[in-house]
Amino acid sequence: MLHETNYRYIVSVMSLRKLMTVLTLLLSAFLVLGFVAESNASTIPNPVKQNAEHAHENSWSENLRDRNWQAYLSPEVKQILTLEDPNPANHNPHTSLHDSGVTPMVNTETGVALWGNCRTINISTLIDSSLVEKEEMFNVVDGVTEVVSAYTGLTMSHKSNYTSTRIDSSNLQIPETGSILIIWVPKDSESLSSQQLGTTKVWHTVENDGTPTITRAQILLSEKIFEEYDSGVVGRGDNIETAVMHEMTHAMGIGHSTHENSFMHTELTNNTFATIADIASLVFAGSRSC
């Protein structure tokens, strides 16, 4: 449980989240993860878990609607995505991401599942009525949403307040099309295993031209995140904000990283940070035109 001083710090950080975003964008390493997160990807109604059984999904395949870049491409990001070569024929960000250890949530022969960047993604927060730190939980999601939007270039709209209700773990609410639903659950919720602090499920559809497109996502977050971590700036330590950032990055269509220091690795180390490949993958996640 956070002390009152930490509560005030969260409010302060969120009220200055625009400044946080600018400062964070200037950092080459900005994210840290301190928990194991199980992530799922599915087309309704059958979820497909991201695990060894689906190892073929760990490659990035190209779609003709990729590379409609919406976010700033720094020289470092251009280099990791092999975009610095003056000959476009030599540009191969998909192979580069794969070689850097970044994986997609869902991969098909006609591309990876990503959000189209011509529509607004609606973010809503649902919090179990038994939880105490509702305002803090909402504020963290609000700040992380802004950072993810800045890195991907995707337009994301977070509702101005949360919904408080008793969460039924046996019948979790399904997000609406075009939205991401964040659900905070009690630490003893049957929705998560005892080892999990968060999990993400992504739905996608295959369009007429074969393009796999994310249509909705659901993120479950345990109140244990607030028990095991303190507040901090997004990505600069094993903190609450970074834990939420990890799951939100899954909702963008990005899977785990094989780089042991990456914030998208399954486990935290003392040297965890956002690799340039992690940042490049977020930039790439916003490159899918509609």
Image (cartoon, rainbow, N blue to C red):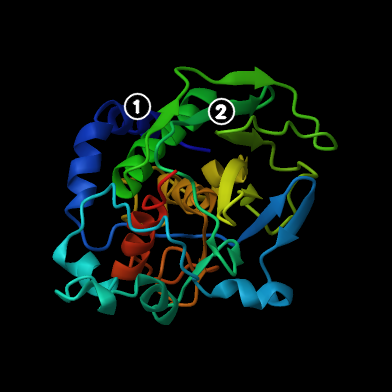
Q: What residue lies at 62% left-to-right and 27% top-to-bottom?
A: 127
Q: Amino acid at mark 1?
A: Val
Q: Does residue 35 show up?
A: yes
Mark closest to the chain's N terminus, 2 or 1: 1
Residue 68, position in %: x, y?
A: 32, 52
Work out whether 265 lies above or below 221: below
Q: Residue at x 69, y 24 (%)?
A: 130
Viewed as shown, does residue 200 lie left or right of 278? Answer: right
Residue at 37 percent across and 56 percent down: it is: 282
User: Dot 2: what SS?
Assistant: strand
- Residue pictured at 33% horizontal, 58% vertical: 67
Q: 76 and 231: which one is in front?
A: 76
Q: Amino acid at mark 2?
A: Thr
Judge whether 48 appears above or below 184 on screen: below
Side of 90 where 52 appears, left or right? right
One can see residue 31 in this view: no
Nearest the viewer among 224 and 63 is 63
The quadrant in which residue 54 appears is: bottom right
Tell me the quadrant of the picture where the C terminus can be found. top left
Nearer to us of marks 2 and 1 is: 2
Residue 3: image x %, image y %?
A: 44, 34
Q: Is residue 248 left or right of residue 45?
A: left
Q: Residues within 10 Å of mark 2 (few under 14, many from 20)?
A: many
Residue bearing mark 1 = 11
Mark 1: secondary structure: helix
Residue under pointer 2: 125
